[in-house]
């Protein structure tokens, strides 16, 4: 997968990716990330990439020319995705769609915004990291990159692990414990010490269902409520709950 990032802050992207879990998969050539800086395409002596907004108002706006020149010279992978609070919200389903692609380009805005003509002419669709405003698209781009890449088999080193996690089957993940079995008098669920792997798998399913019921009832609704089998294993493992309307 070839990922290109258009950003005025190359070091934010590079430093994160060089230190994260993803760096090994990058070295193994499972994906490549290249960062392109619009400043390299500025034409004046000051390397100007922004200007004040027409119509007045605070802040600066990213200019068309450096970004248009960058895109026309770099043969970037499609689609071009703009990071913006107004875009489609990043979630597991979107990460899964992106993980099936051969590549894409991420355009990170900075300053107060980017000239709308860049979005209209160069961007295929926009993605948001959530309903809040960041100083720029870089953190959102990194969240998109990491959530997408970890779904590609081989990236995490363990093909199964990303499928076992929260959201993969519409549930939050079950809780984890490690040694010691008792810490300051608080013990881990006994079933985990039983060595009975079928029972442990069933407990994990029940614990995942319960955690999702309590913390994200909207996700239980989205999967059509609890099945009879779900209700059975919740009761068997001692979870009682009330489904809220
Ligand atoms: N740029 C600024 N805020 C953002 C957000 N919430 N998501 C994506 N890009 C952004």
Image (tube, rainbow, N blue to C red):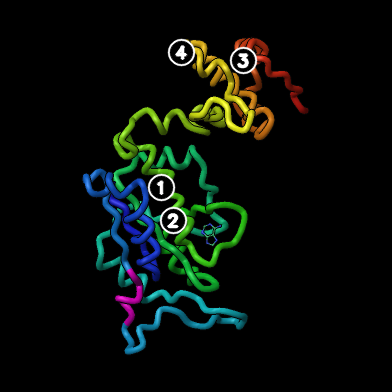
Which callout, 4 or 1, points to the residue nearer the camera?
A: 4
Question: Residue at image x 31%, y 66%?
Answer: 36
Q: Which residue is mark 2?
A: 141
Label 2 CB sits under 8 Å from any ligand 1 atom: yes
Q: Which residue is mark 3?
A: 230
Is 210 left or right of 165, judged from the image as shown?
Answer: right
Q: Which residue is mark 4?
A: 195
Label 1 CB sits under 8 Å from any ligand 1 atom: no
**Residue 38 in magenta stretch:** yes
The magenta segment: 37-42
**Residue 99 picture location, percent across and down:** 37, 40
| Nearer the observer, 163 or 100 | 163
Q: Which mark is residue 146?
A: 1
Q: Is residue 48 above or below residue 179?
A: below
From the image, give the main secondary structure of the stretch colored magenta: helix
Distance (Cα) linking label 1 and label 2: 9 Å
**Residue 40 picture location, percent across and down:** 30, 76
Distance (Cα) linking label 3 and label 2: 37 Å
Distance (Cα) linking label 3 and label 4: 23 Å
């Amino acid at each position: 997968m070839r990922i290109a990032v258009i950003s005025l802050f190359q070091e934010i992207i590079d430093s994160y990716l060089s230190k994260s879990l993803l760096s090994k998969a990058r070295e193994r050539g499972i994906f490549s990330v290249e960062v392109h800086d619009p400043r390299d395409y500025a034409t004046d002596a000051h390397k100007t990439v922004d200007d004040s907004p027409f119509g007045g108002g605070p802040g600066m706006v990213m200019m068309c020319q450096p970004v248009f020149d960058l895109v026309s010279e770099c043969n970037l992978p499609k689609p071009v995705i703009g990071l913006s609070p107004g875009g489609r919200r990043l979630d597991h389903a979107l990460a899964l769609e992106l993980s099936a692609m051969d590549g894409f380009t991420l355009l990170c805005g900075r300053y107060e915004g980017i000239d709308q003509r860049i979005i209209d002419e160069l961007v295929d669709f926009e993605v948001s990291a959530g309903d809040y405003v960041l100083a720029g698209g870089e953190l959102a781009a990194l969240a998109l990159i990491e959530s997408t890449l970890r779904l590609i088999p081989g990236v995490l080193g363990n093909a199964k692990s990303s499928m076992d996690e929260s959201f993969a089957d519409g549930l939050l993940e079950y809780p984890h414990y490690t040694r010691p079995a008792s810490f300051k008098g608080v013990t881990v669920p006994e079933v985990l010490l039983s060595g009975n792997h079928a029972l442990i798998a069933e407990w994990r399913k029940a614990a995942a269902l319960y955690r999702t019921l309590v913390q994200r009832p909207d996700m239980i609704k989205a999967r059509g409520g609890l099945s009879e089998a779900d209700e059975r294993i919740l009761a068997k493992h001692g979870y009682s709950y009330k489904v809220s309307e």
